[in-house]
Image: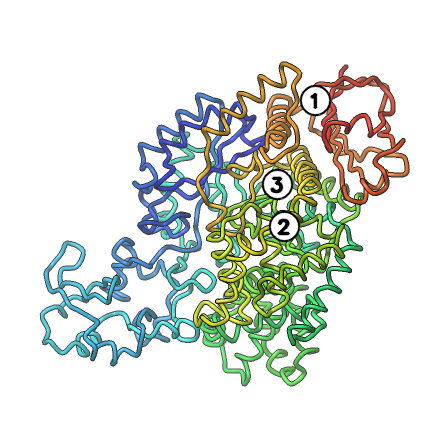
């Protein structure tokens, strides 16, 4: 087994697809060409969790996902087929939605600061007057008590000797010595180590650190050696006993000291392959001194997407957006930098106000106007976080931008700057943890749903103000990855992407047909509209990009998108009247608008497939470790979670791969159609070649394409193989195809791994090379 993978295949392990069931697909993964299996979180999570990121017990594998025996069985099956194993872990937070399921949290609620586990949680006890604030009530506490909605059960239990109290589905322990008190419920509540509060108090009154704005996920302090050891003992065992080979670290930016954490993890695992879910802003570099093999690949995703986007079309889509905004009574101008400043500021003043207030309380001395200044600095911070003492330039940028936008805050900002630059101060460390949460909620979860001109641009880690890359820029990015992070993951789809790779590939066609899209959108809005033009654009793009999509799936997406955007409705206070418009669009997609949608999809689907195959081959053969998200070896037209976590039919894929191998052996190549066999061909051949012949993928050298259509080709040599892909297929078709455009080649003959066709040495006409598919994978024949 190699210590570093050549590729990975992500599997979502759930109660309906357990480790035992996953063991049954390891043979298929090997035949597909995957080198390692990549598993979603395995530790015990909140009952019914579909994702596993809400861990409740670090000491055991989730029984509903297969338990310890399931991992043993999966590991044995993987080894039998030559697969390595990468496992996703969650060091930043734990699930507390069901307190009784989390022994640490339950103990803290029962014993308060006297709990042995109290130190594990980042709780501001002074802010809560010695209690943990729990914002779970539907009304003020006194009114909830008066209505009799809280009940008490004084029956002793092993984990609750004094009994429990219940509020609907919420069950909490009674503190020692309080169970036998009088029936005065208010007095009983006052005696507990937690403070029940109205649910809206989470915005400004919470006193424990959490994951982003999710109060059901409480952060833990893995920077403390004992907490690290206790929370990683089972994970380290997997590595030491050979049950797993590598680790993917979720959300390291939430940690107090990501660098120190990675050092401890590397020491504990003997330097096992480790990736981090680190989102890099455009131009930002991963800290070179960290003990990690790289990121989970959103940086590569952005590069591949953007080399396939027509920049001139994006300008026209921006003009369309301006028209839609004007028609909807919205400000016409929408600068990306201003938009994300405002959405981040809204988060600092709203959902994440508790975190800002904690920063103020961490100051070594009082500063007048500190809360306002903190919120403005967070809104102006250009990246997810800095890693002091490195990253002072990001703080300097935020200070200068905050002063420009808010000159009235110059004095408190000047006082804060030296404090936030000092890594020895708690306030500086907490600011680094907070800036990432503000960025994630303000940009990914809000601005991405407001900046709707082209869905391809608003993907995790993407900067919509950088709409496209030239081919030379793309090549430079790949050369940089090979030089700096050759074992970093590359990806196109994940459980966190807003749209799957094939939806984005289809939507990229809109940048080549902006006028046509404007006409179609007008027709669709005439049939069903929310009255909010940019949101209509987003939703009808979703329908077109994911078609065929059911009304139920489209409505689920529409509600999430509209509430995340937070302009006309929201999560905390949904506007039922406005959301009727969402229902009308979802219904119309399979009603009055169906003919229009299907007609337009028929116009662009072929070009979308071309983009998909190009993107896939580029990803699978470029520097880095390519990951295939479960099921995406066929066309995958999924939207944001939970849509992208739907069950995968592996039996169908295994049958298709068997049939494909037999057909190709007989000289029968699959057509590019809605069955997806063409994508399966590209995926399997590229993965197999990369796994079986890694020596062919040692360099990255841009290849020369000469001729009138040269701008439509992306070609690069990896040492013994050359990847050729097509970009901007609509414009290529309009110009009449490749003509005499040539791929300049050495005198070595080659074979196209995808089609089996052989080519002699010297230049190759792209019209001939790309006769069957918009991509080719040429292996040198020596």
Q: Which residue is mark 2?
A: 286
Q: Helix or strand or loop: what does disc 2 sit on?
A: loop
657 and 86: which one is in front?
657
334 and 64: which one is in front?
334
560 and 780: which one is in front?
560
Q: Helix or strand or loop: what does disc 1 sit on?
A: loop
Mark toward the start of the polypeptide (1 vs 2)? 2
Q: Helix or strand or loop: what does disc 3 sit on?
A: strand
Residue 549 locus on image (x, y percent): 53, 48
Report if residue 33 is visible in the image.
Answer: yes
Residue 244 locus on image (x, y percent): 44, 33
Q: Which residue is mark 3?
A: 490
Residue 297 locus on image (x, y percent): 60, 45
Which is more foreground, mark 1 or mark 3? 1
Residue 349 locus on image (x, y percent): 52, 76
Q: CA distance from mark 2 to mark 3?
A: 14 Å
Q: Which residue is mark 1?
A: 755
């Amino acid at each position: 087994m190699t210590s570093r993978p050549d590729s990975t295949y992500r599997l979502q392990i759930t109660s309906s697809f357990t480790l035992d069931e996953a063991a049954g697909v390891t043979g298929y993964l090997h035949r597909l060409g995957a080198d390692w299996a990549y598993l979603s979180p395995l530790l015990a999570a909140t009952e019914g969790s579909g994702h596993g990121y809400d861990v409740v017990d670090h000491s055991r594998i989730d029984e509903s996902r297969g338990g310890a025996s399931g991992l043993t069985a999966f590991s044995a099956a993987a080894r039998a087929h030559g697969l390595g194993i990468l496992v996703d872990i969650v060091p930043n937070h734990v699930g507390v939605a069901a307190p009784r399921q989390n022994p640490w949290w339950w103990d803290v609620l029962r014993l308060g600061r006297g709990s042995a586990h109290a130190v594990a949680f980042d709780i501001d006890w002074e802010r809560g007057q010695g209690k943990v604030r729990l914002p779970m009530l539907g009304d003020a506490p006194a009114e909830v008590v008066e209505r009799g909605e809280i009940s008490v059960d004084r029956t002793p239990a092993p984990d609750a000797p004094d009994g429990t109290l219940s509020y609907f589905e919420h069950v909490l322990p009674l503190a020692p010595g309080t169970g036998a008190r009088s029936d005065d419920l208010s007095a009983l509540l006052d005696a507990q180590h937690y403070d029940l509060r109205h649910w809206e108090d989470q915005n400004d009154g919470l006193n424990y650190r959490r994951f982003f704005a999710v109060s059901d996920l409480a952060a833990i302090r893995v920077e403390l050696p004992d907490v690290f050891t206790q929370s990683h003992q089972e994970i380290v065992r997997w590595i030491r006993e050979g049950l797993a080979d590598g680790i993917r670290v979720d959300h390291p930016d939430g940690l107090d000291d990501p660098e120190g954490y990675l050092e401890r993890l590397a020491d504990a695992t003997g330097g096992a392959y480790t990736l981090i879910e680190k989102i890099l802003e455009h131009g930002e570099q991963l800290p070179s001194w960290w003990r990690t093999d790289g990121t989970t690949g959103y940086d590569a995703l952005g590069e591949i997407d953007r080399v396939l986007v027509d920049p001139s079309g994006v300008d026209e889509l921006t003009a369309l957006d301006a028209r839609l905004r004007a028609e909807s009574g919205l400000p016409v101008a929408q600068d990306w930098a201003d938009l994300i400043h405002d959405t981040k500021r809204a988060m600092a003043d709203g959902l994440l106000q508790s975190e800002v207030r904690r920063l103020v309380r961490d100051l070594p001395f009082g500063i007048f106007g500190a809360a306002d200044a903190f919120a403005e600095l967070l809104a102006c911070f250009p990246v997810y976080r800095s890693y002091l003492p490195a990253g002072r330039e990001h703080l300097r940028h935020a200070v200068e931008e905050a002063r420009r936008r808010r000159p009235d805050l110059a004095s408190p900002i000047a006082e804060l700057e030296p404090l936030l630059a000092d890594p020895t101060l708690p306030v500086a460390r907490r600011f680094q943890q907070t800036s990432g949460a503000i960025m994630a909620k303000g940009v990914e979860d809000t601005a991405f749903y407001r900046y709707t001109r082209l869905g391809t641009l608003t993907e995790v880690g993407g900067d919509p103000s950088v709409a496209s890359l030239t081919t030379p820029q793309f090549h430079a990015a790949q050369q940089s990855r090979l030089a700096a992070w050759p074992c970093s993951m590359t990806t196109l789809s994940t459980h966190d992407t807003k749209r799957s790779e094939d939806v984005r590939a289809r939507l990229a066609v809109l940048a080549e047909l902006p006028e046509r899209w404007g006409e179609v959108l007008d027709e669709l809005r005439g049939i069903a509209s929310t009255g909010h033009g940019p949101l209509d654009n987003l939703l009808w793009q979703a329908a077109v990009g994911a078609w065929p999509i059911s009304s139920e799936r489209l409505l689920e997406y529409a509600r999430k998108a509209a509430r995340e955007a937070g302009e006309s409705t929201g999560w905390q206070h949904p506007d039922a009247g406005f959301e009727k418009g969402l229902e009308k669009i979802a219904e119309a997609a399979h009603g009055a608008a169906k003919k229009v949608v299907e007609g337009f999809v028929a116009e662009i689907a072929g070009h979308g497939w071309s983009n998909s195959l190009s993107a896939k081959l580029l990803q699978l053969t470029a520097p880095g470790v390519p990951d295939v998200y479960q099921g995406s070896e066929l066309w995958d037209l999924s939207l944001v979670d939970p849509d992208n976590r739907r069950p995968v039919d592996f039996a169908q894929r295994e049958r298709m791969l068997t049939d494909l191998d037999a057909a190709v052996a007989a000289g029968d190549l699959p057509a590019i159609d809605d069955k997806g066999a063409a994508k399966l061909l590209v995926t399997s051949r590229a993965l197999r070649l990369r796994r079986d012949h890694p020596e062919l993928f040692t360099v990255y050298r841009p290849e020369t394409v000469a001729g009138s259509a040269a701008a439509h080709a992306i070609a690069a040599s990896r040492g013994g193989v050359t990847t050729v892909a097509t970009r901007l297929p609509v414009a290529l078709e309009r110009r009449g195809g490749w003509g005499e455009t040539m791929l300049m080649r050495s005198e070595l003959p080659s074979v196209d791994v995808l089609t089996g066709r052989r080519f002699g040495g010297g230049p190759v006409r792209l019209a001939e090379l790309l006769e069957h598919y918009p991509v080719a994978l040429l292996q040198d024949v020596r």
